[in-house]
Image (spheres, rainbow, N blue to C red):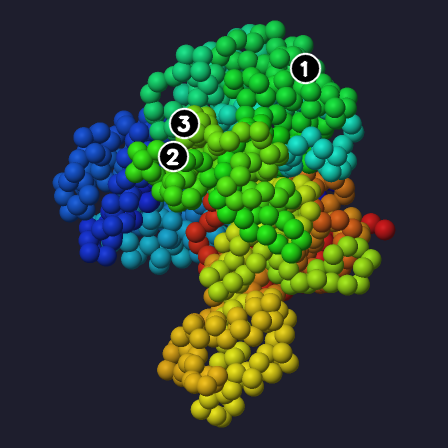
């Protein structure tokens, strides 16, 4: 849809912003610590560490920093002392960069140096020119005749400099923070500002109308659009689904039946840009790593390649041996030496300057295969039939996948619908599926927990092990011999005796200080062997799949399906059945919902597996360490509520004690569900548990009293941040979109005026601007587009900022009132940068229904 005539052309000088922000952080930290080292000393140390980390980075900003800051100063031991000479030298060096660097696009510091405040206090017309520069969102000063009309000299400072687009009330503070010196009296700025502001109104009024002045003072939507870049980084698509065996592919709906099977590399995701003969390479998290990839830059600079954006993987090789993702990340970001980097491209989003993300994968693959692959090299490789195959059946997918998995750099395959497009602005592509390769291991069954439905939870072991291994690792004893415990195999129907050997399929082996752990273990058969695999085998496998602790956050970022959410309560076992059953359920909001089979006792709980064996169950099993703490917290909360209810019943009875039989009657009457859930309605288990509680005292015979001298803790649940909530993006019946926000037990919503799927991805992927209103009523929706967590940023009249972290969208979202069609209207847009603005004033305005502008309607009548 047309975007109501608005145009947003402001270019952000990113280097200027980096220098100014860097200086402000150092300045505030240094002056605070110098004045009060006891309170701010630790903060200054952290600032110094940040400066050192930046100093060791290789980018344009660091090159500019090194022009002013000496390495000896930054890395001296004395610099941690804010009152030392070295600390002052570090501060002065960064201050000099701020005022003298050619990279800083600041007309006032360029012409006036560190005399900006002195000049503004002395010359009111210069102050008025500064205010106009601070208010505007373009690069045009007021015309000379406007200044001449009030007998003032024209603005000769700000021509061709983009304005700051600040609110009037923020300008004095900006001046003090950006130009103030520690020994300078800035108290007169506020009063001088008032006079200069009135003078600017007079100058402006000599040339323009009052409406124009109102538009100047109002924040323009482009002003806070810091996210604009000359070349846009595209959020890399990842597979939405993960399968564990080929039959799982049948559960993924909406596929055409024709696929491209591509090698999945154990490397680091990169994006390669070439525009106007300039090559830029970005990491998966939008860091510029061009300087780390000279061979790839050299290859892409050749005339064989036109303007393009390529999607690929960067891998580290030691000779011809591929290393691991953690090694690649350490090589790029931690400057670890050794090895050579090689890149493999597997997709293309821009070709010959044209955006082809909306073309099918069939077309994009053909472009790569017939126009790029002929230029493949060891440093920059493109798809070949060895690592990329077209399959027209699930049987062929399995055949080709197993062939590709044998390649040395492969950690599996990605199966892509051949008609899939590249989803701009979202993280997960619903037409892509990940399938990692597995290895088989023979293990000993050391323990067996069995459910009523005949499922087994086996504790697995390796051994018996030698005395030396037993000294180096934590072992368990079985039949007078030592074994390494290596994890559990859940959801197992195969019944064997303790001590038997079973063959399990696993996709990852990790080594820790106490031993080894097998991930996603599934019993596949009973082998004809008498001993388990050896510790040496685990050593080899762990070295092939290792993940360093320092990169676990990256590893988690690769998990398919987003966040796991565990709930408890009643759920329909199947559609159309009125009966319900109580239990614990888990979802990742992608693969469906799974029922967790577990058993509680006084010491905690044991997870046996899941009801069924579909994709959700398999993904939950693989990622069990990411969500099992949620189960524990739910149980703690339930037990706390249950304990509190018993304690209150005893205290409110007016007796000194209460017979257990009376307590039991109360529980059966009021809390029968919790009794069954927590204690299987077993009187003995309940009695034993109550005897262990600190605020319930057992009295012989079979009576309890409650202690009043213990302060109650709130229900034991995870502490949530005050500014965090949940969101849902839903397509309405009228084809508009609702952003529904659940925050502090309240539900509210924005409605955004769009006209179809193209607008949705323009809004969330390309920062398009669309009219919005505060929803009067949240109605029925046709389709849920996304769900996730929402962080509330600035919440004030006329402006609301959020950060969305969901399954599809990960972005900042803004709602602002702007002058539109000669009246004020709400506009919604998203941004690429994830940092929230720090000024969170007026937090009481989080309820958008209480915003002064909540009554505003769409700027144009809605179509029928």
Categorize mark 1 by other alpha carbons within 10 Å: few (<14), some (14-19), many (20+).
Answer: some
Out of 789 and 455, give the one closest to the viewer: 455
Foreground residue among 209 and 585: 585
Asked if one can make out residue 820 in the rendered structure from this viewpoint, the answer is: no
Q: Quadrant of residue 623?
A: top right
User: Upstream in the sequence, badge 1 or badge 3?
Assistant: 1
Residue 150 placed where, x, y %? 45, 47
Q: Residue at x 64, y 60 (%)?
A: 583
Decide if residue 62 is in sight here.
yes
Residue 471 position by quadrant: top left
Secondary structure of the residue carrying numbered label 3: helix
The furthest residue to the front: 479
CA neighbours of label 2 inside 10 A, class few (<14), some (14 to 19), many (20+): some
Residue at 54% in and 25% down: 411
At 41% across and 39% down in the image, what residue appears?
A: 484
Tell me if 474 is positioned left or right of 295 in this view.
Answer: left
- Rendered image: mark on residue 536: 3
Q: Earlier in the sequence, mark 2 or mark 3?
A: 2
Q: Are marks 2 and 1 in contact (CB under 8 Å)?
A: no
Q: Which residue is mark 2?
A: 465
């Amino acid at each position: 849809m047309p975007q109501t005539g608005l145009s947003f052309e402001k270019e952000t000088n990113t280097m200027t912003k980096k220098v100014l922000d860097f200086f402000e952080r150092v300045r505030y930290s240094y002056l605070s610590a110098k004045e009060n080292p006891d309170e701010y000393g630790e903060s200054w140390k952290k600032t110094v560490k940040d400066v050192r980390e930046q100093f060791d980075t290789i980018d344009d900003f660091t090159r500019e920093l090194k022009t002013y800051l000496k390495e000896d100063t930054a890395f001296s031991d004395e610099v941690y002392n804010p009152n030392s000479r070295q600390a002052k030298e570090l501060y002065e060096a960064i201050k000099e960069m701020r005022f003298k660097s050619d990279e800083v696009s600041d007309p006032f510091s360029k012409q006036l140096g560190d005399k900006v405040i002195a000049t503004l206090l002395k010359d009111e017309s210069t102050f008025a020119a500064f205010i106009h520069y601070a208010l505007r969102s373009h690069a045009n000063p007021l015309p000379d005749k406007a200044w001449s009309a009030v007998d003032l000299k024209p603005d000769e400072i700000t021509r061709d400099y983009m304005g700051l687009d600040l609110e009037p009330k923020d300008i004095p503070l900006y001046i003090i923070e950006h130009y103030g010196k520690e020994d300078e009296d800035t108290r007169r700025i506020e009063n001088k500002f008032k006079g200069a502001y009135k003078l600017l109104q007079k100058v402006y009024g000599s040339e323009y109308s009052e409406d124009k002045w109102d538009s100047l003072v109002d924040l323009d939507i482009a002003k806070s659009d810091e996210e604009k870049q000359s070349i846009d980084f595209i959020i890399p698509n990842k597979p939405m689904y993960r399968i564990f065996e080929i039959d799982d592919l049948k559960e993924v709906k909406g596929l055409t039946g024709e696929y491209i099977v591509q090698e999945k590399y154990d490397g680091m995701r990169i994006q390669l840009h070439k525009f106007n003969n300039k090559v830029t390479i970005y990491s998966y998290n939008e860091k510029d790593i061009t300087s780390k990839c000279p061979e790839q830059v050299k290859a892409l600079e050749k005339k064989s390649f036109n303007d393009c954006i390529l999607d690929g993987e960067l891998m580290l090789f030691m000779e011809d041996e591929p290393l691991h993702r953690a090694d690649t990340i350490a090589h790029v970001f931690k400057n670890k030496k050794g090895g050579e980097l090689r890149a493999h491209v597997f997709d293309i989003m821009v070709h010959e300057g044209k955006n082809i993300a909306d073309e099918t994968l069939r077309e994009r693959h053909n472009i790569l295969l017939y126009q790029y692959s002929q230029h493949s090299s060891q440093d920059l490789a493109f798809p070949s039939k060895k690592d990329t195959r077209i399959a027209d059946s699930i049987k062929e997918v399995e055949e080709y996948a197993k062939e590709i998995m044998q390649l040395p750099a492969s950690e599996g395959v990605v199966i892509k619908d051949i008609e899939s497009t590249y989803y701009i602005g979202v993280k997960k592509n619903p037409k892509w599926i990940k399938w990692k390769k597995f290895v088989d291991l023979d293990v000993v069954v050391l323990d067996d927990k069995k459910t009523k439905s005949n499922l087994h939870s086996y504790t697995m072991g390796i051994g018996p092990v030698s005395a030396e291994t037993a000294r180096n690792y934590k072992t368990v004893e079985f039949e007078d011999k030592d074994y390494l415990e290596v994890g559990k195999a859940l959801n197992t129907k195969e019944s064997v005796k303790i001590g038997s050997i079973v063959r399990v399929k696993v996709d990852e082996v990790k080594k820790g200080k106490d031993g080894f752990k097998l991930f996603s273990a599934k019993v596949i058969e009973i082998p004809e062997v008498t001993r388990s695999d050896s510790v040496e085998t685990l050593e080899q496998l762990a070295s092939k799949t290792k993940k360093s602790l320092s990169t676990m956050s990256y590893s988690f970022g690769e998990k398919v399906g987003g966040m796991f959410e565990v709930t408890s309560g009643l759920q329909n076992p199947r559609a159309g059945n009125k009966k319900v059953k109580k239990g614990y359920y888990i979802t990742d909001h992608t693969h469906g919902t799974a029922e967790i089979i577990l058993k509680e006792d006084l010491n905690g709980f044991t997870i046996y597996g899941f009801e069924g064996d579909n994709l959700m169950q398999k993904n939950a099993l693989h990622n069990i360490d990411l969500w099992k703490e949620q189960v524990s917290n739910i149980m703690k909360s339930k037990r706390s509520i249950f304990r509190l209810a018993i304690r209150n019943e005893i205290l409110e009875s007016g007796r000194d004690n209460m017979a257990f039989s009376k307590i039991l009657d109360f529980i059966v009457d009021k809390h029968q569900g919790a009794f069954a859930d927590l204690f299987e309605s077993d009187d003995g288990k309940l009695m034993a548990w109550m005897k262990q509680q600190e605020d319930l005292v057992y009295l012989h015979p079979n009576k309890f009293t409650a202690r009043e001298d213990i302060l109650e803790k709130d229900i034991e649940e995870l502490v949530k941040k005050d500014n965090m909530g949940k969101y849902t993006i839903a397509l309405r019946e009228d084809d508009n979109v609702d952003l529904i926000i659940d925050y502090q037990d309240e539900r509210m919503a924005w409605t955004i005026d769009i006209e179809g799927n193209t607008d949705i991805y323009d809004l969330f992927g390309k920062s398009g601007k669309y009219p919005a209103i505060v929803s009067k009523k949240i109605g029925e929706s046709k389709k849920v587009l996304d769900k996730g967590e929402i962080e509330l940023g600035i919440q004030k009249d006329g402006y609301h900022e959020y950060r969305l972290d969901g399954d599809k969208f990960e972005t900042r979202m803004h709602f602002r009132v702007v002058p539109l069609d000669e009246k004020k209207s709400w506009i919604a847009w998203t941004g690429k940068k994830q940092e929230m603005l720090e000024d969170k004033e007026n937090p009481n305005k989080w309820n958008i229904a209480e915003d002064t502008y909540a009554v505003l309607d769409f700027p144009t009548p809605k179509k029928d």
